[in-house]
Image (tube, rainbow, N blue to C red):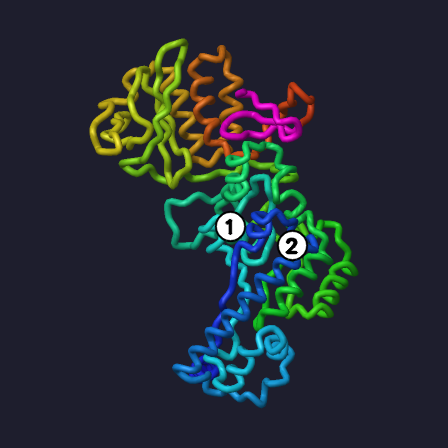
């Protein structure tokens, strides 16, 4: 069997050159994903990719020889090859003379993990959502010191974390806009798109791809079997080699939209990751009752893990919190100089209790927005200790998260979201911090 695999790979020398971030590319060009202009641009992108890759494969064949089972007579009437003849006659002539190094060159994979790392849209897919959504990461049985947020019907364990699309956030920072309906992604999320245009876009790309394309049509929960059948038949007639449909809530997804609130009827118990001896920390300067105060936020994998407070000014913006012994922590600067020998020594019992409970909530995965909102409800004025911590932690709420139960004082809408820790209105542009 393995000899058959080796023989197939050697004789055909298949490769799978592809792309990712098509959705971001169209948004960057100011084109709606399923618009005629967007579809035409995808046609140009994939045509350029095809001709470039086939030219490269032919050039390699000149030097190294064609793939072993190459036979011009067997593919000269292939519709894919004949399109190349129309688009680039010289490439077609060289291919007839020299062959290619690879029997097939192109695909478009999901690029899920890679696109998550590069913070782009995946493959040919549109943006999933422009409000923060949840992504699930499967936990391997051998993993230790990890947090289990969800167990699916098969017993597999998953960790959930918030995703906010970085190019959209960059657009907001560059333009200063908080109204997401003005963004180039508006109307182009996975659940917004016209499925017929979505199939047409994939079919246009498929004309330039010799393997298959990974693409998913997102459908509402109440979609009918007849509609699903129609999508498959339309894709087949359009020339797609395959297509996937996903009906909302038909299975436990890896991407979960936050557009609708999911009811939870039980407490989910979690285990917090063990604290390392040293944690990187952000140093924040504020005031409590008019007195200079330093709030330290320890970070574990860039997520807020703990909060410590020192009454007084500690210089700098970045540092490291080092555990000396139980209840004794010191702060080092980025150059390892000692900035504070004992962080906790200035807090009284009540303040120490509040920071410990806040840290416990953070490291057990509580929603940081909920933590801030609860701290804001503690009795006391704007300059109280609890409000001081809340003001700092609000800076870690992802942009675009809805502000619970808040109404815009300017336009009276329920469209308040957090932008850089401040409540801002998507409808009228009001900002609480302005």
Please provide the residue range marked out in magenta: 415-434
Left of 21 or right of it: where is 304? left
Q: Where does the image place residue 315, in percent across and percent down from the top left?
A: 29, 22
Left or right side of 286 for 102:
right
- Image coordinates for residue 56, horizontal then vertical, percent: 46, 73
- Using a 10 Å C-alpha cutoff, classify the residue at mark 1 as few (fewer than 14 neighbours), some (14 to 19) or many (20 or more): many
Judge whether 263 appears above or below 379 on screen: below
Residue placed under numbered mark 1 in the picture = 120
Q: Are marks 2 and 1 in contact (CB under 8 Å)?
A: no
Q: Residue at x 65, y 42 (%)?
A: 186
Say above or below: 43 vs 83: above
Location of mark 2 (residue):
38
Question: Vertically, is 230 above or below 325?
Answer: below
Q: Which mark is residue 278?
A: none
The location of residue 14, given as percent across then percent down, is: 48, 76
Tell me: residue 291, above or below residue 242: above
Q: What secondary structure is found at the residue carrying circle 2?
A: helix
Residue 220 percent across, percent down from the top left:
71, 50
The quadrant in which residue 79 appears is bottom right
Compare residues 410 and 295 and report the one nearer the observer.
Answer: 410
Residue closest to the eye, 391 or 124: 124
């Amino acid at each position: 069997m393995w000899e058959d695999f080796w023989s197939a790979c050697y004789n055909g020398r298949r490769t799978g050159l592809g792309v990712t971030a098509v959705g971001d590319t169209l948004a960057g060009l100011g084109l709606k994903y399923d618009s005629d202009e967007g579809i035409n641009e995808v046609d140009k992108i994939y045509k350029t990719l095809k001709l470039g890759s086939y030219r490269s494969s032919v050039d390699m064949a000149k030097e190294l020889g064609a793939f072993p089972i190459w036979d011009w007579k067997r593919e000269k009437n292939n519709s894919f090859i004949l399109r190349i003849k129309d688009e680039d006659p010289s490439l077609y002539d060289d291919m007839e003379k020299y062959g290619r190094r690879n029997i097939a060159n192109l695909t478009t994979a999901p690029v899920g993990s890679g696109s998550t790392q590069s913070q782009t849209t995946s493959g040919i897919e549109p943006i999933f959502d422009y409000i923060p959504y949840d992504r699930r990461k499967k936990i391997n049985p051998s993993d230790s010191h990890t947090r289990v947020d969800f167990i699916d019907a098969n017993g597999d364990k998953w960790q959930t974390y918030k995703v906010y699309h970085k190019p959209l956030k960059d657009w907001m920072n560059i333009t200063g806009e908080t109204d997401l309906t003005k963004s180039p992604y508006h109307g182009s999320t996975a659940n917004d798109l016209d499925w017929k245009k979505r199939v047409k876009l994939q079919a246009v790309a498929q004309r330039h791809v010799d393997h298959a394309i990974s693409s998913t049509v997102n459908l509402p929960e109440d979609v009918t079997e007849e509609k699903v059948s129609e999508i498959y038949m339309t894709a087949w007639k359009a020339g797609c080699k395959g297509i996937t449909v996903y009906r909302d809530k038909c299975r436990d997804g890896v991407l979960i939209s936050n557009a609708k609130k999911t009811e939870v009827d039980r407490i989910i118990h979690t285990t917090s990751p063990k604290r390392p001896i040293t944690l990187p920390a952000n140093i924040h300067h504020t005031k409590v009752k008019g007195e200079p105060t330093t709030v330290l936020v320890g970070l574990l994998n860039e997520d807020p893990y703990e909060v410590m407070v020192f009454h007084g000014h500690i210089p700098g913006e970045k540092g490291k919190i080092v555990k000396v012994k139980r209840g004794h922590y010191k702060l080092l600067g980025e150059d390892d100089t000692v900035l504070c020998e004992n962080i906790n020594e200035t807090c009284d019992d009540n303040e120490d209790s509040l920071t410990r409970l806040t840290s416990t909530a953070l490291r057990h995965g509580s929603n940081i927005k909920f933590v801030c909102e609860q701290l804001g409800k503690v009795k006391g004025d704007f300059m109280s200790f609890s409000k001081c911590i809340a003001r700092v932690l609000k800076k870690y709420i992802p942009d675009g998260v809805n502000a619970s139960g808040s109404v815009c004082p300017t336009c009276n809408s329920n469209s308040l979201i957090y932008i850089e820790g401040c409540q801002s209105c998507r409808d009228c542009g009001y900002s609480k911090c302005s």
